[in-house]
Image (cartoon, grey):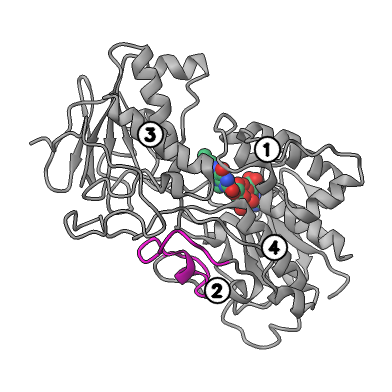
Amino acid sequence: MAELPVVVVGAGPVGLAAAAHLVERGSTPLVLEAGEQAGAAVRQWHHVRLFSRWAELVDPAAERLLASTGWQAPDPDGHPTGQEWATRYLQPLAEVLGDRVRFGARVVGVARRGRDRVVDAGRDRVPLTVHLADERITARAVVDASGTWSGPNPLGGDGLPAIGERAAAARIGYRVPDLDDPAVRSRFAGERIAVAGSGHSALTALVAFAELAAAEPGTHVTWLLRRGRLGDTFGGGDADQLPARGALGRRAAAAVEAGHVRIVTGFRTRAVEAAADGLVLVADDGRRLDPVAEVVALTGFRPDLSWLSEVRLDLDPVLQAPRALAPLIDPNVHSCGTVSPHGARELTQPEPGVFLVGMKSYGRAPTFLAMTGYEQVRSVVAAIDGDQAAAGRVELVLPETGVCGGAGVFDDPAGAADGGCCGAPVEPVAVGVGRPQD
Ligand SMILES: Cc1cc2nc3c(=O)[nH]c(=O)nc-3n(C[C@H](O)[C@H](O)[C@H](O)COP(=O)(O)OP(=O)(O)OC[C@H]3O[C@@H](n4cnc5c(N)ncnc54)[C@H](O)[C@@H]3O)c2cc1C
């Protein structure tokens, strides 16, 4: 099996980093990417500026590989946009890897050769097969770095589409809109807009919409939160060890304070009704919002596990992340935003040679960082190479978010822990907080 390639699914930041580590160890990677370019998912949020610095966005093995080509590393303290991350780093990295990266190659299945998931015999002796639409590739190991970008969560509060959500698809978006694009801007300018979600994407969208509302009279933004109160939604502010991430929360808080955003808490969307003057969102407690022209649902992502049905995975029933990783990242219990660096030990699956890494390894958990993924693949590639000492080593300190508490604010506004145990939270803002409508 040593002659066979290690197939890496996805030429995103983490998949390409895995390939660089494999090359450094003398193994043969084959990266299969569904899109036509490196960083196909990152390019779709090209307009968003990352809160991570370049120094946190370049994998060390990839940098060593790129250095051999005379690549000039960007200013380590700069913050790229998604577009810059893709063109200044991911694309050159894919070019160095050459024909070890195949584009337009969507993986539709992974299996143990000649055995479905039920057959025990010989599982550890035969290779894996990776299925493309009309091709089979035999692999020594499969590193699934396919991300979760293709699986945005729906607006519906149950995690399933709300009644009418699919029918209203033309006016519901699931991505942070690019308001610098004149066509996109004119679609939202002067309109009533609902933004749902409480993560960094939602905060990014709120900041952009608040600027639009300030510039374009008649633009009204309603922010829908499923949780019962704002709590630590704005993040850890100064206590966040990634300053740009803390600053994003402060900018969103300022947008609310300036009165550009009306907040509705405890709103779990049950239905989307089409009315003459827009969409009416209905909560599961019966509340109805005034009609809006557009809805932007930024409620997180979920992994596509459908094409892994024939391999044996041990996933956490809550997060759909590798079971040993889940306690480290569970937003229900997560304290202080810390995630211990982790690698092959937490990511090893019952199916020999199959690893979920990168954004996909987090399942439904939020706040994945590329630097977490780089450490994962350093360790996983060492394990595939049989170097258990390197696989077990921890070579990274991850930054804290400065936020404590988890999801306590969901059902119990009064009882939830106040603020952060890692520092003072961003002040929840009272101005502009809307009351639930009847
Ligand atoms: C708006 C936004 C802002 C972010 N900001 C930051 C930040 O500041 N700092 C940070 O560290 N992280 C940030 N993230 C998280 C970021 O997405 C990850 O750090 C990084 O992109 C994860 O890399 P990945 O390789 O795991 O997944 P992706 O970047 O999602 O790459 C997965 C790749 O797999 C491909 N693929 C998917 N399915 C298949 C298939 N079946 N077959 C073949 N190929 C497939 C996709 O086309 C894609 O190219 C941000 C995310 C978003 C959405």
Residue closest to the eye, 403 or 179: 403
- Residue at which label 1 appears: 85
Q: Real-space Cα distance between discs 2 and 3?
A: 39 Å
Mark found first going from the N terminus, 3 or 1: 1
Q: Earlier in the sequence, mark 4 or mark 3?
A: 3
Q: How many marks?
A: 4
First-in-chain label (1 vs 2): 1
User: Which numbered disc, 1 or 2, marks the residue closer to the eye?
Assistant: 1
What is the CA distance from the residue labelled 1 to the residue labelled 2?
A: 32 Å
Q: Which residue is mark 2?
A: 313
- Amino acid type, label 2: Leu
Rendering quarter of residue 253: top left
Label 4 element class = helix
> Which SS does the magenta portion mostly show?
loop
Residue in the image at 21% along x and 19% along y: 277
Residue 175 lies, in percent from the top left, at 46, 36
Picture disc at residue 252: 3
In percent of width and height, residue 348 lies at 62, 75
Q: Is the residue indicated by label 4 positioned so its CB lies within 8 Å of ligand 1?
A: no
Residues rendered magenta in the picture: 319-340
Contact, mark 1 vs mark 2 (Cβ under 8 Å) = no
Question: Mark 1, residues whose alpha carbon is within 10 Å: few (<14), some, or many (≥20)?
Answer: many
| Residues marked 4 and 1 touching at CB (< 8 Å) | no
Q: Residue at x 60, y 71 (%)?
A: 347
Pointer 4 or 1: first along the chain: 1
**SS type, badge 3:** helix
Q: Kindly state the secondary structure of the residue where label 2 is placed.
A: loop
Viewer-nearest of discs 2 and 3:
3
Q: Residue 69: x, y in percent? A: 91, 42
**149 to the left or right of 141:** left
Location of mark 4 (residue): 377
